[in-house]
Image (cartoon, rainbow, N blue to C red):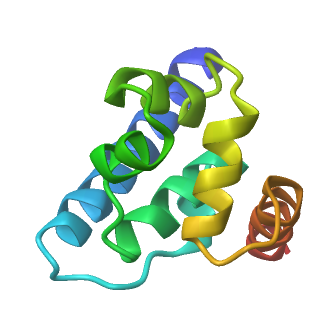
Amino acid sequence: MKILKLLEGLYKELKTYNEYIALIEKDKLQTISPQYFLSPFDWIKYQLKLKKIKLVDIAKKTNRTKTTVSSVLNSKRESAHIKSAVAELLGYKSWQHLLEDAEKNIKKADN
């Protein structure tokens, strides 16, 4: 029973997160509560959406496919080249700096 309630709670949070993302894509919302970020990669993807940077933009910059870029942003593949391009597009010196900032922002939300 506890597991079912936990899963229901997670589903509600994920549904809310997805609703926020849908609003962002429609340019109706420019901020999102950091509590909805499940990982640093979620925060990074959110920053890309805010700056209206699309997968195709990253793909063109890196000469990779959208699928490859998506896989890197979803932690399914590794590519230093793509990570470096994402960091640069978001105004960071390196992927490591971007990741540190993402983790810092997520920790703020936990407090």
> Which residue appears at 19% of the width and 68% of the height?
23
Write down the quadrant of residue 72 in the picture: top right
> Which residue appears at 47% of the width and 32% of the height?
69
Write down the quadrant of residue 26 in the picture: bottom left
Q: Is residue 29 above or below residue 59?
A: below
Q: Nearer the viewer, residue 49 or 23?
A: 49
Q: Nearer the viewer, residue 39 or 54?
A: 54
Q: Nearer the viewer, residue 7 or 1?
A: 7
**Residue 79 horizontal side relative to residue 71, left or right:** right
Residue 45 spot, x, y in % from top left: 49, 54
**Residue 27 horizontal side relative to residue 38, left or right:** left
Write down the quadrant of residue 81 in the picture: top right
**Residue 13 horizontal side relative to residue 98, left or right:** left
Question: Can residue 37 be spotted in the picture?
Answer: no
Number of numbered callouts drawn: 0
> Which residue appears at 34% of the width and 54% of the height?
16
Q: Is residue 13 above or below residue 75?
A: below
**Residue 86 horizontal side relative to residue 103, left or right:** left
Residue 107 spot, x, y in % from top left: 85, 66
Question: Can residue 53 be spotted in the picture?
Answer: yes
Q: Is residue 31 above or below residue 37?
A: below
